[in-house]
Image: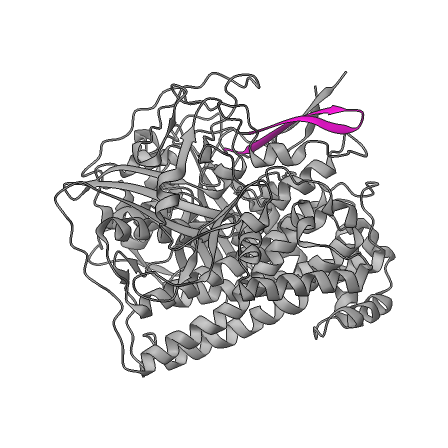
Amino acid sequence: MKRVLIAGIGNVLLGDDGVGPYVVRMLESLYDFGDNVVVADIGTPALDLTHQIVGLHSLILVDSVASDDPAGTLVLFRKEDILRETPAQRLDPHSLALSECLMTADMLGASPQNVLLVGIAGKCYEPGHPLSAAVLGSVELAISAILLELRRLGYTFQKKLSLDEPSIWWNDHHNSSPIETQGQQ
Amino acid sequence: MAKRITIDPITRIEGHLRIDVEVDNNAVSNAWASCTMWRGIEKILRGRDPRDAWLFTQRFCGVCTTVHAMASVRSVEDALKLEIPLNAQYIRNLILIAHALHDHIVHFYQLSALDWVDVLQIPKADPAAASKLAETLSPWGRNSRNELKAAQDRVNAVASSGQLGIFANGYWGHPAMRLSPEVNLLAFSHYIQALEYQRKALQVVGILGSKTPHIQNLTVGGVANAIDLDSPSALGMSQLAMIGTLLEQVVQFVQQVYFVDVCAVAAMYPEWFKIGSGVRNYLAVPDLPLDSQGSAYDLPGGYIRNGDLAGVKGFKTASDPIFRQSVTEDVMHAYYQGDKALHPWAGETEPAFTGWDGEQKYSWVKAPRFNGEPMQVGPLAQVLIGYAQGHPLTRKYTDLAIEKIAAIGGVRATPAALHSTLGRHAARAIRACMLAELAQKHLQLLTENISKGDYTVHNQPVMPTHEVEGVGTHEAPRGTLSHWIVIKDEKIKNYQAVVPSTWNASPRDRSGAHGPYEASLLHTPLARPEEPLEVLRTVHSFDPCMACACHAFDPSGRKIGVAKIL
């Protein structure tokens, strides 16, 4: 069975960095997929991403990107764009390692053939902030991009008849207001 | 004139470790460790229900997910004086052990082995000779000529493509690299195999926690696992058997491969038993509770001052009164308002960024202190504290490591040699062997307890209306982790996490005392200051994990880490 993983990446506690998990949780609440499609909020997995992608046929990632484009802009990357990045000399070994994980999977001969990174330009990465309006406004577009890619690859999906409540548990600011910060670089 | 080298592999958004060293006559004469990003995530927790805190803390860091979840529920349980059913203790212990085994394997092979192993020497190796050599070291069944040849072919494929890809940033051919092509090949073959076994350890976490990387089964007062001996979907005989099979394979890899490789590297770089010592105060908390009250543990804790093993003091419990009273965080040299040293329950996290200034404030990391002193935490601290207290399991594997290193290299290390860069690697491998043995023990304890008909997994928490304080600790893969909580009116009033890398990456404090990273780098000889491999070796030996929580993919390629000479 040719499997595809749709993975939301990012830290849900840090403002727009949480857009990846947000998008995949919305996607899950809106659509039904076949057994060969896995949708997951995988947080910030660093090198463990390798274990998630080894043996996949296709991979669709959703993540915030550092970009000079206005917040909310969708920026798409393919495998060769990502592989162009040279892995950094790691002092702190735990930052996101997208290119490293793909290269490791390549070395094992088990790398996904199709990779699409749906990047969303972020604006505010401060703890406790909800998604900024521009980023929230691009969620629908990001979902369309994912669905287009699935269709291109021949995977099927169906709009749910009764919509599930999306489980965006971290966005529940019932008891605490967004944090105002100062001095952030 | 000393020159300063900055190692700063930083992206725009990622908060990372930065190391500055002054080099004089090819040796480090001064050092600063700093973190480049403000976190302060704890503030998000104020006002929330304490029972939900673990869901949030699990997202502090993408690598250390389970450890922050565990410390969080323990902090609430400590505040409420809540006992934990035996099944829940064993299930939690198994998750913690499996996570730690995964983490230690990743650390050695994927994150630090290539500081010692020169990948570009591998094409010169003779796989048959390497296989023969391996036979003398270990009974491991996957050191055949064919297996090693396949690993060599993988390196050849990468090297012949003209681009080094994943190996693009190593210090290959550096004069401080000294292994033979065959040993390099052997280690690299295990680097590839390590990927398989770390995944098996993660599967154990996934079965018990119902998901990875974010486990779902925790709850204040126990766990949420359904126990049913006959159901394949609940925790019953079939899942326990599956966990047993996975653990057995991981245990073999740890004891026959990881442990042996660390001993071999140690035997071949013995001078690194004399480099990288630094702060010789050590701190560890007891972990892997064996009863519901938390009065007996499989891993001992305590503290050592000035490297005096004979003067070791033990902690009786995971929230020992001495520990509770003795921790402060000093912000004299950290980018926070004021210059106070506060207890975590009274902790403040008010940022005040002033820019890097080695004389003043230079890091986002606070300086945790124990009775006012910097402490080194991590596997080395735990092994020394256990060894000094005569803990049988610690002694068993420490003595085994000393024997093995002597057998390979003819150099007889003493426990005192463990105060070093290599000591940290050796201690991590020793701890992994201990945990491997304990994994099987705790699986058996769980199975026996369930077989007796005890299916209890949870005690209901009762929230007091008055103000209470608690500390939840965990001896995590990188060392002592503590979450400090103040609860008032059933809500979180204050929350502070003092994480292992805060202890180790701490900046100077009010007395000017260096943190452990900083102190460990002093006097390190550098063969080529423009390629500070030796600095990396020591920093990596701590297994740093800074603000792994925050990242964004940076497509512009600005992230490449370089050593700048200023």
Residue B17 in magenta stretch: yes
| Residue B150 relative to residue B230: left or right | right
- The residue under the point 73% across, 42% down is B170
The quadrant holding residue A28 is: bottom left
In percent of width and height, residue B316 lies at 39, 55
Residue B204 in magenta stretch: no
In percent of width and height, residue B504 lies at 53, 38
Give the prevailing secondary structure in the magenta stretch. strand
- Look at the image and give the residue range highlighted in magenta: B15-33
Closer to the camera, B81 or B162?
B81
| Residue B239 relative to residue B265: left or right | left
Q: Quick check: B487 above or below B452?
A: above
Closer to the camera, A126 or A74?
A126
| Residue B383 relative to residue B30: left or right | left
In percent of width and height, residue B59 lies at 38, 45
Q: Which quadrant is the N terminus of chain B positioned in? A: top right
| Residue B50 relative to residue A33: left or right | left
Closer to the camera, A107 or B146?
B146
